[in-house]
Image (tube, rainbow, N blue to C red):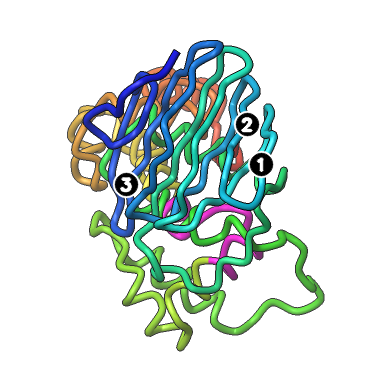
Amino acid sequence: MSEGRNRHGFFGDAERSGSFASGRLHHHVYSERTSTQQHTHDYDLLYWVKSGRCRDKRRRSTILAGEGDLVFLPAGTPHATDWESDGRLLHIEVAPDTFPSFHFQESSRGSASRLARIEAELFEWDEISPSIIEQLVMTLDVSTASNRSQEPAWLALVEDYIRELGPRPLSLDEAANIASLHPTHLSRAFVSWRGITLSEEARLVRLRRAAARLRKEPNSRVGDIAAQEGFSDQSHFCRHFRRSFGRSPQSYRLRSSADGITSAKTLTTF
């Protein structure tokens, strides 16, 4: 069965789509025995096979991709896909030459935890999600291994900058200026040292600040605290608060007054 492209320029059924500064994300579902006609993409394309099995046919090679594989397709490369079973894909489109240091093989099984975090941001979208996704995409070809013997001096400077932001959104260019690093290198290096992106760190700092206020300001409304700490949507604030602290803001406040809770869990990563 051959399919035509949808409004996003892909085949299959789109479940969710979103955009970030350098590209776009799409989550698609494919049916068994679906075949796509040969086509090209205007953007460099990474696709992560969440489930199923497909054959990606190119001029000089055929890639058999299954669950967990991350496949790279340079912009303008003709290809066609045959699905051997029902499947789900996360497509990541990146403007050509945005990240010239990509060193992907045609197919890889690395970066699974970061891809899962990108997918989670797509399905739990808020105002910080595009920034987090941008930074995670920059790190997909980078090993998490680092020499931990001595942290670089720029790390403390950047973390001070994040703490002093208040409710203001993080600026990657400002952080890179402070660190005297290229923004792409800073994004990758920060994830390597801390395991989360700069924007995730900024969100966690704001959540911790909100938690402190919930403890110290029993008469302040949760929505007011969320807004003053830079969260434009209270439901997003509550979701991220629960993920980081293990309970809702209201429950956290009540529990804190009862037994003196003073610290957050580390931000959960996927």
Tag 1 and tag 2, C-beta contact below 8 Å: yes
Tag 1: amino acid = Thr
Where's residue 63, x and y in %? 67, 40
Tag 2: amino acid = Arg
Identified at 67% across, 38% down, the residue is 69
CA–CA distance between discs 3 and 2?
Answer: 35 Å
Q: In which quadrant is the N terminus drawn? A: top left
CA–CA distance between discs 1 and 2?
Answer: 7 Å
Report the residue marked by disc 1.
62
Of the image marks 1 and 2, the number of the one nearer the N terminus? 2
Of the image marks 3 and 2, the number of the one nearer the N terminus? 2
Tag 3 and tag 2, C-beta contact below 8 Å: no
Q: Specify whether residue 69 is in view.
A: yes
Mark in front: 3 vs 2: 2
Q: In which quadrant is the C terminus drawn? A: top right
Judge whether residue 189 is colored magenta.
Answer: yes
Where's residue 192, x and y in %? 65, 63
* Residue 10 numbered tag: none
Tag 3: amino acid = Ile
CA–CA distance between discs 3 and 1?
Answer: 38 Å
